[in-house]
Amino acid sequence: MNFFEHKEEYELLRKTIREFAEREIRPIVPKMESENYFPYEIIKKLANLGMLGGYANSIDTTSSSIIIEEISRVSPAIGVIVSVHNTLVCNGIYEFGTEEQKRKYLPELISGESIGAYALTESHAGSNPLEMKTYYKKQGNKYIINGRKIWITNGPQARYILLYAIGDTENPKNSMNCFIIDTKREGFSIGIIHNKLGLKGAHSCEIILDNYIASEDEILGKEKEGYKIAMKLLTAGRIGIASQSLGLSIGAYELALNYAKQREQFGKKISEFQMIQYYLSEMITKITASKLLTYYASYLKDNNRNARLEASMAKLYASETANYVVDRALQIFGSLGYAMDFDIQRYFRDARVLTIYEGTSEIQRVIIAREILR
């Protein structure tokens, strides 16, 4: 398939998920915002539509991008819930898991019966995972895990978590394992649930492992190849966040465009003013560039080509575009944009984290530089 040719099934998928988002997700957004409510029923309905499970449910990277984009156009919070569940957890188990692990975990994750989370970040190991302190000690065929992770999206709701720990503090890169953690087991607990500026309803928390016991068959991939797995999965995860950023940008742009065509000042619609036209033209141009970068990275991934560079470019550009778009959109709304009564402030708050998680903008620039200088 040529990159610029979207197959008919992709457009049907887009139509299906957009209609679902308008019909099912938009009405629940106020409840998520006011109560920080986790939308269990939406996750289950998405599962019934066949939208969960990633590769294990025949959802390729391009389809995943469409799903996350269209959900995030209405609710970036639900967009990130799905992105973590699909692109990191389900795809991780599908790509690196044994046949037994796939049979054990994936049916529950595809059906929405269980929710997945991904635990790499620690208080001293954000941009540099090799600084992590969570460690395991091997005893026979068992692994005793101790440590804390922070900012774990879906953490309070997750049944299964892909969690990284090291076995040798002197050699973290070559001793790191990725464990499939069962949150119902003794030794696992939830710590602080983070009170966030935005993405209400998508919960992030601290998780604590206190002598948690994992078995050999709960290591994802080969032993001591956790770092390699983490880096590969983050490529897919960054495409997911680029898709979330793209959807958020489109949602905010549409609000601003519609408002500009209705709002009158000095006897005419503000969309007739040259400066407002400048804002709108800049917004849609950056959104289109974000879309091309995101879908090109998806295309490369679907064709088994190295997409590390393109995923970082897409994540960097789309996340920074989202922050530009919501800033201009709020400016178009004027003082009303600052009011909690109007939805644009929600997009403004939701956008800010996009340049931080799944690798900061600074880290994306480092990755891009390394790739082009290699």
Image (cartoon, helix red, strand yellow):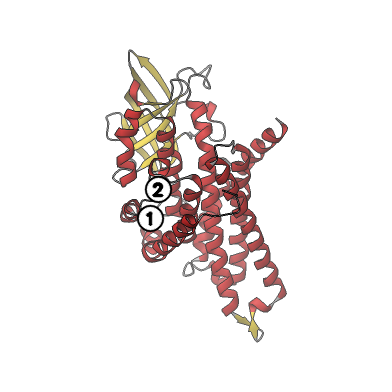
**Residue at x-position 54% and y-position 26%:** 130
The image shows residue 256 at horizontal and vertical percentages of 57, 69
Q: Give the class, few, some or many, for how many residues have Cα within 10 Å of label 1's Cα (few <14, many ≥20).
A: some
The image shows residue 336 at horizontal and vertical percentages of 54, 72
Residue placed most toward the observer, 43 or 67: 67
Mark 2 belongs to which amino acid?
Answer: His
- The earlier-in-sequence mark between 1 and 2 is 1
Contact between marks 1 and 2 (CB within 8 A): the answer is: yes
Residue placed most toward the observer, 308 or 280: 308
Tell me if residue 53 comes above or below residue 31 in the rendering: above
Label drawn at residue 203? 2
Look at the image and tell me in which quarter the C terminus lies: top right
Q: Secondary structure at mark 1?
A: loop
**Residue at x-position 46% and y-position 55%:** 9
Q: Is residue 240 left or right of residue 17?
A: right
Q: Tell me which corner region of the image, top left, top right, bottom left or bottom right, holds residue 32.
A: bottom left
Residue on which the image places disc 1 = 36
